[in-house]
Amino acid sequence: MLWPIGHAAGRDRRKKAVATGASKIDMECNYWFKRENNLMQRRHFLAMIPFGIGLGATAAMAQDDPLGAIFMQLPPRTRRDLQEELSYGGFYDSALDAAWGPGTRRGVISAAQFLNQNSRGRIQPDLSSVRGVQIFMTSLAAREYSAWLYGEGDEGSDGF
């Protein structure tokens, strides 16, 4: 079979090709080349789908998690600074990519628990309200809890 049967446009193209002197081999090669090119374009599109899904996965994960939704509303620089502060404190060991994921979630919760314990109840991060989480995350990013997370050398002045 050289061409799809019953296709009017294909018949017209074949008639023109025969009239111009093209051989059946030329027409068959042309048909298969166009068909293969079309398939390659489809394969390229299908190959890109996992990348598109992967880019949206972080945002989807953040929307399912209230902490993640609040985190993703912060400016990218603040998110990266927060991850960097968690990394300095030993609460985060993934890439500093300003993206929400399980490592960032663990780090935020662990840091909040550690701050409460290490400050002997002086610092009690509120992770139960939107405003409390926003304050905690922006304060972490601004390095306001550095002395309690990993120490700066002057934490003994308060008697601890």
Image (cartoon, helix red, strand yellow):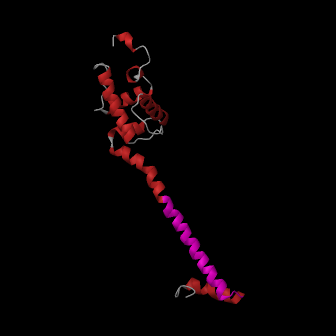
Residue 15, given in percent of the width and then of the height, sits at 64, 88
**Residue 89 position (above or below residue 3):** above
* Relative side of 19 to 69, left or right: right
For the C terminus, give its image quadrant: top left
Q: Position of residue 17 (x, y in %)?
A: 67, 86
- Quarter of the figure with residue 136: top left
Q: Quadrant of residue 141?
A: top left
Q: Residue 138 versus residue 96: which sits nearer the camera?
A: 96
**Quadrant containing the N terminus in the rendered view:** bottom right
- Most foreground residue, 99 or 10: 99
Among the 4 quarters of the image, the one containing residue 150: top left
Q: Which residues are magenta?
A: 21-48
| Predominant secondary structure, magenta span | helix
Q: Residue at x 45, y 35 (%)?
A: 79
Q: Is residue 87 visible?
A: yes
Task: Indicate left or right for 144 with 19 as reference.
Answer: left
Tell me residue 40's x, y (percent).
56, 69
Residue for point 68% across, 88% down: 23
Instruction: Specify whether residue 39 is painted magenta.
Output: yes
Q: Is residue 16 visible?
A: no
